Image: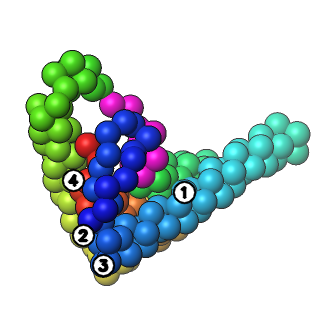
Amino acid sequence: MQPSKSSNGPATATPGGVAAAYIRLIDRLSVTTAVIATGLLISGVVVVCQMIFVRYILNQSTVWQTEYTIYSITGAMMLGAPYVLLTKGHVAVTALPDFLGGRARVIMLTIGRLVGLGFCLALTYAAWYYVYEAWHLGWGTGTVWNPPLWIPIFPMAVAATLLCLQYIAEFLRGAP
């Protein structure tokens, strides 16, 4: 490992070899899913505008627009989560670790990451199991549109998996 200057202050260890390749791969995947999330968010906004036009200008009913918007924006939120972790854009209350500083800060932040990883592992298992059930049992959403349920659940499973992998990358990166 080589020391590198982090943007937050002290030098951190930069892994080499396989760990560095893993970090680059997961970082790229996180950026890619963020781009997909952006597309889903934009499509959700466009569909809301289309729905308003159809309902209030054309005086016609809508069938799929509300459900699509809910699923696309929820998928965007989930698929954007690994990128938020990568860029440290999440909301964090670090008053106590920052006050304590030093080793206590590193320990508290590491415990927080471990708890976050544990939650994401549980979410990943549950999400993939849910996708499996929805696929094999042929579940639909139960609405007028009634798309297969595995389709809107799938982004949650992918995002939870990538979030776990991004947590591991953050541990390998060594930054507190």
The location of residue 173, given as percent across then percent down, is 30, 57
Per the image, the residue denoted by label 1 is: 34
Residue 151 shown in magenta: no
Amino acid residing under circle 1: Ala
Residue placed most toward the observer, 142 or 37: 37
Per the image, the residue denoted by label 4 is: 117
Please give the name of the residue rendered at 31% of the width and 55% of the height, measured from the top-left corner: 3
Q: Measure the C-alpha gap from mark 4 to mark 3.
A: 21 Å
Amino acid residing under circle 4: Leu
Please give the name of the residue rendered at 39% of the width and 45% of the height, measured from the top-left corner: 6
Which comes sooner in the sequence, label 4 or label 2?
4
Label 2 sits on a secondary structure element that is helix
Per the image, the residue denoted by label 2 is: 129
Label 4 sits on a secondary structure element that is helix
Depth check, mark 3 against mark 2: the one in front is 3
Amino acid residing under circle 3: Val
Disc 4 to disc 3: CB gap under 8 Å: no
The magenta segment is 84-92
Which comes sooner in the sequence, label 1 or label 4?
1
The location of residue 62, given as percent across then percent down, is 70, 50
Q: Which residue lies furthest to the front in this view?
A: 3
Using the image, determine if residue 24 lies above or below residue 42.
below
The location of residue 102, given as percent across then percent down, is 17, 31
Please give the name of the residue rendered at 42% of the width and 52% of the height, measured from the top-left corner: 86
Residue placed most toward the observer, 13 or 133: 13
Q: Which label belongs to residue 18?
A: 3
Residue 90 shown in magenta: yes
Which comes sooner in the sequence, label 3 or label 2?
3
